[in-house]
Image (cartoon, helix red, strand yellow):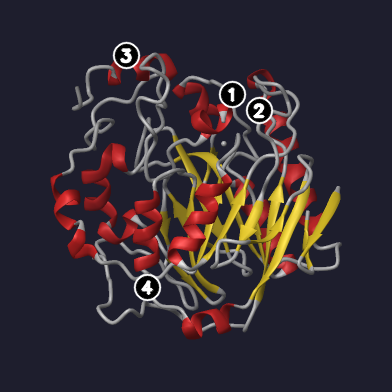
């Protein structure tokens, strides 16, 4: 493993990325010292530029981004290969503490445990993990041992959503408690010419039922923790979503980007909203369906001015880290300034190409079935 240094800090989607960000299932569990959306909670946006927080436990924290490989599990040896991936992830958690700077929050990409391949929905449900489950318990033990937050994505099952293939971003706190399980907000439809589409379930795909179950606040789930307000997301090129998060008080946005990403998209999230953004991409990944170096590397942390604080200079497995002066930042930070009256009418009249709730009654069986199902669902000419 290598470490890159930029500005004095330790530092170490795209073919796969446009396919790989799959639907995720998410709720944040409220608890002392950490808070997130609760069932039935309305959206809270303060009218004075401030936003909800919990008291900070420290003036600054070290954010670490674990750029690691994506190895798909072998369905013929499912348990063994999934465990091998988990063991590798656990070893990287150990390794992150052996450098000059130990992360207070360690952030992985979407699929460190299951990997990604063009599986069917039934196959995804086989490779998926339970949250909580054996894998999260092992990761929680590391969180307790090192006193760190650990954030990672995975295919997951949820008994409240039987048959739905989900991809969840989980936040585990230093006490080993799961404080958030965040659904992916949406998948891009129409990206592959209508022949194939993503089939996993996102918030947008079941929006009405989702809000009935969890409340409107859970659609953009900003999690209030003692090291800052955190939003996790695996979507790209939807700046309005991150603007909404910033209005709600997001201070640090953690974005997974397995399979490549546009650095401009990440930088703009920070620049336009005046907050911290980290992106975790995969490293060189042998054993997948593509060339092992396709769109690998580039994981980075950006400051509120959009400039990189730390960036991977290698596509190999590596740690990117930077110190976040959260207390100093919070003292002067406010919601972004938006002159909404200038363009509110345009947003009110805009009709999205695809309506929400398309997976409420039908979940496609694979990528091609999703393409067939969605082919006539668009509202644009």
Q: Disc 4 or disc 1, which is closer to the eye?
A: 4
Q: Are marks 4 and 1 in contact (CB under 8 Å)?
A: no
What distance separates the C-alpha of mark 1 from that of mark 2? 6 Å
Give percent across and percent down for residue 380.
20, 26
Q: Residue at x 51, y 27 (%)?
A: 124
Q: Which residue occupies the foreground of this view, 302 or 282?
A: 302
Tag 2: Cα neighbours inside 10 Å, few (<14), some, or many (≥20)? many
Q: Residue at x 37, y 69 (%)?
A: 336
Q: Are marks 4 and 2 in contact (CB under 8 Å)?
A: no
Q: Which residue is mark 4?
A: 335
Q: Quadrant of the C terminus?
A: top left
Give percent across and percent down for residue 65.
68, 55
Residue 348 appears left or right of 256: left
Q: Which residue is mark 1?
A: 117
Give percent across and percent down for residue 130.
52, 43
Q: Which residue occupies the foreground of this view, 364 or 302?
A: 302
Q: Which residue is mark 3?
A: 372
The label on residue 72 is: 2
- The mark that comes first in sequence, 4 or 3, is 4
């Amino acid at each position: 493993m290598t470490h890159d240094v930029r500005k004095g800090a330790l530092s170490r989607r795209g073919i796969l990325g446009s396919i790989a960000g799959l639907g995720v299932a998410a709720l944040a569990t409220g608890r002392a010292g950490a808070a997130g959306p609760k069932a039935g909670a309305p959206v809270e946006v303060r009218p004075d530029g401030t936003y909800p927080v919990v008291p900070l436990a420290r003036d600054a924290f070290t954010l670490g981004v674990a750029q690691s490989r994506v190895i798909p599990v072998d369905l013929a040896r499912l348990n063994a290969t999934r465990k091998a991936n988990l063991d590798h992830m656990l070893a990287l958690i150990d390794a992150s503490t052996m450098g000059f700077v130990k992360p207070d929050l360690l952030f992985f990409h979407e699929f460190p445990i299951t990997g990604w391949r063009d599986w069917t929905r039934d196959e995804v449900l086989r490779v998926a993990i339970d949250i909580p489950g054996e894998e999260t318990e092992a990761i929680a033990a590391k969180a307790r041992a090192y006193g760190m937050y650990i954030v990672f994505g995975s295919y997951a099952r949820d008994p409240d959503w039987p048959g739905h293939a989900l991809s969840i971003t989980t936040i585990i706190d230093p006490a080993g408690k799961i404080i958030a399980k965040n659904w992916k907000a949406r998948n891009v439809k129409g990206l592959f010419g209508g022949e194939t589409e993503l089939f996993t379930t996102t918030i947008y795909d079941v929006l009405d039922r989702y809000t009935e179950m969890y409340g409107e606040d859970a659609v953009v789930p900003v999690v209030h923790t003692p090291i800052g307000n955190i939003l996790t997301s695996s979507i790209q090129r939807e700046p309005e979503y991150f603007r909404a998060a910033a209005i709600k008080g997001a201070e640090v946005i953690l974005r997974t980007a397995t399979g490549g990403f546009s650095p401009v998209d990440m930088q703009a999230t920070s620049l336009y909203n005046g907050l911290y953004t980290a992106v975790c991409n995969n490293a060189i990944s042998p054993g997948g369906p593509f060339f092992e170096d396709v769109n690998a590397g580039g994981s980075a942390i950006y400051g509120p001015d959009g400039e990189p604080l730390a960036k991977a200079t290698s596509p190999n497995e590596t740690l990117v880290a930077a110190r976040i002066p959260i207390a100093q930042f919070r003292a002067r930070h406010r919601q972004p300034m938006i002159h909404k009256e200038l363009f509110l009418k345009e947003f009110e009249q805009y009709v999205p190409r695809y309506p929400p709730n398309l997976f409420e009654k039908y979940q496609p069986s694979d990528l091609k079935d999703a393409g067939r199902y969605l082919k006539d669902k668009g509202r644009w000419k």
